[in-house]
Image: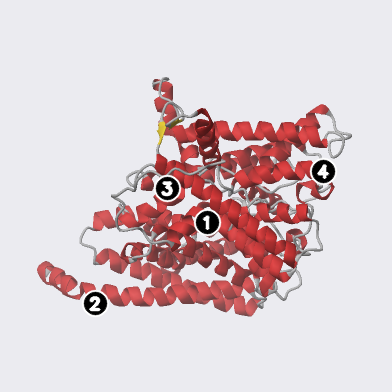
Amino acid sequence: MRELLYSFLYDSREKVLRTTRFFTVLCALAALSLFLYEYGFPITEEIETKIHKWINLFFLFFATQYFIRLLYSFERADFIKHTWLEGGMMTFILITGVLKYGFHINWIDDFFHLFHFKHHKQVMRVIISVSTLYFAGFEFIKLSEYLNRLTIQPAATFIFSFLFLISLGCGMLMLPEMTVSGVGASFSDAFFTSVSASCVTGLVVVDTATYFTHKGHLVIMLLMQLGGIGIVSFAMFFTTFTKSSFGIKHQAIIQDFLSTDSLHSAKGLLRQVILITVLIELMAATLLFFSWGDKIAFVSFQEKVFFSVFHGISAFCNAGFSLFSDGLYQDVVRHSYILHVIIGMTIIIGSLGFSTIQDLFSPRLLRERMDKPWKDWKLGTKISVFTSIGLILTGMLLFALTEWNNSLVGLTKFEKVVTMFFQSVTTRTAGFNTVDFSTLMVPTLIFMIFLMFIGASSGSTGGGIKTSTFLLILKSSIAAIRGQREVDLGKRRISNELLFKALSIFVFAATYNLIMIFLLSISDGDKPIINLVFEQVSAFGTVGLSTGITASLSMFGKWIIIISMFFGRIGTLTLALALSSRIKCNSYSYPDAHIMIG
């Protein structure tokens, strides 16, 4: 009998799994559609009850297909090991269901009654809904496994993932339940907001705080999180729970996005980066929770928690979105300087780059440095940290010189230092403001444009040409002036390939911004040119700071800003690599040319 059973399973395996996979995808589509309808449209209690009955059925199907896959698995122990999260959730809810409907034992109700909790039924409904949503979404996350079969470059995959995220966010924000008016955002407003959130910029054409509902704010927060980490990287992170290895295409995409040294380290870095990211955001949210001033009248404990999490994610992802109409310049938080310091430090950590974060905060590396004090940071980490410190201090000094008798008037020494620090930090790529930018001096705007153009560090959530690019161009310029044949940094020789990449990024970025500024001066010539330059560089650097002209731009001007936010997030070099074709051979050289320079 055992041999007959195994023979039957082997013969029917391919057909059963293919059929199960087909119906699983259909159920996933149906479940996601129901969630979308429930979340985005006003519904009655009767319809909500029917929706949750269908959700329970979908969950039952997902549980069934899981055990079918387990039955047909040749290595069941490995299958359970790699799907422990999925299996654990299935087993927990199925055992609960069997005890309740088979033996009339409702242990969850009894457990909640011990603590006099009256909303346990709603909690169970949420647990089942979230579980079903997880399994439905996981079916589409598994599609990332097919990346190895695609012939497109990793850079192109990275671009398409952002286009998909932007489109999804735009569609969500157009749903009736997303806006206070109950009719949904217009396409132009929804698309602009989705691009700004997905590209972690922070420029807005509507008041985020009052225009969108709590559901809309949640969508924006998820767009910031996925846009900051990268939706493909996020999807690949979840696939690590179901498979032990990545394909070359997966690893190449992670290597490009996170700026890792090798393909081998890509998967380990991805897990560490996301886990460290979540921990940092949780720590930031916790500190923010206890830092809100007494002037803020939160409606409930849940609202206070959401505000903390929203601003924690916005700060770490360098997004600059705020749930206050005037940002951190709002009266209730303008003078909360401890709050400003917490957000500022979170911005700095997020702008350092994922590989730098791993090098600085990885428990394994921290233990190694404690045991072996001579072990130093990586060169990339040093560049990221020390260049950021130098730019922050420079920004503070220049802000003090230009704004001492303007926006800093009336503040104490401590308040001036915090304001200088915060604006120098946020100008690099974060987009929060604690001063009124429409009143800043022109020299202040000019040096801020310079800082926004440089931006954050490589492999981070920020934009700009990146600190490493700026440092390499600066070092190569000094070397050329001094007549040095080689460029060195940290007792390491910088290859010509890296110098050419840095120069390419700078030339592409400078040329692109000049073209866009020229177009803005035509479409919105009624506005001061300094404001247009500031707006354009802010969009390209995914900074999100504005002198207040974003909403009043013409439709053509808004589309220029949209394109700039997108190009600024994916990077000019990434775009060039995606669109260009590699030369077949470069193993030749021409005689040296002699051209007058300068």
**Which residue type does callout 4 highlight?**
Met
Circle 1 Cα neighbour tier, 10 Å, few/some/many (<14 / 14–19 / ≥20): some
Which disc is residue 342 wearing? none
Query: Where, by quadrant of the figure, is residue 241 drawn?
Result: bottom left
Q: Is residue 480 left or right of residue 86?
A: right
What amino acid does circle 3 point to? Leu
- Give the image location of residue 486, x and y in percent: 42, 32
Q: Quadrant of residue 425?
A: top right
Image coords of residue 388 (percent x, y)? 59, 35
Front-most of residues 398 and 373: 398
Query: In this rendering, does residue 463 appear at all?
Result: yes
Q: Secondary structure at mark 4?
A: loop
Circle 3 sits in a helix, a strand or a loop, which is it? helix
- 252 left or right, relative to 456: left
Residue 175 in the image, given as x and y percentages of width and height:
65, 74
- Residue that carries the numbered disc 4 in the rendered image: 441
Q: CA distance from mark 2 to mark 3?
A: 35 Å
Residue type, numbered disc 1: Ile
Label 4 vs label 3: CA separation?
Answer: 43 Å
Q: Which mark is residue 270?
A: 3
Q: Nearer the viewer, mark 1 or mark 4?
A: 4
Local secondary structure at mark 2: helix
Q: How many marks?
A: 4
Q: Which residue is mark 1?
A: 570
Spot the residue most to the right.
410
Query: Which is nearer the N-term, disc 1 or disc 4?
Result: 4
Select label 4 or label 2 by which is in front: 4
Q: Earlier in the sequence, mark 4 or mark 3?
A: 3
Q: Which residue is mark 2?
A: 15
Q: Is residue 113 visible?
A: no
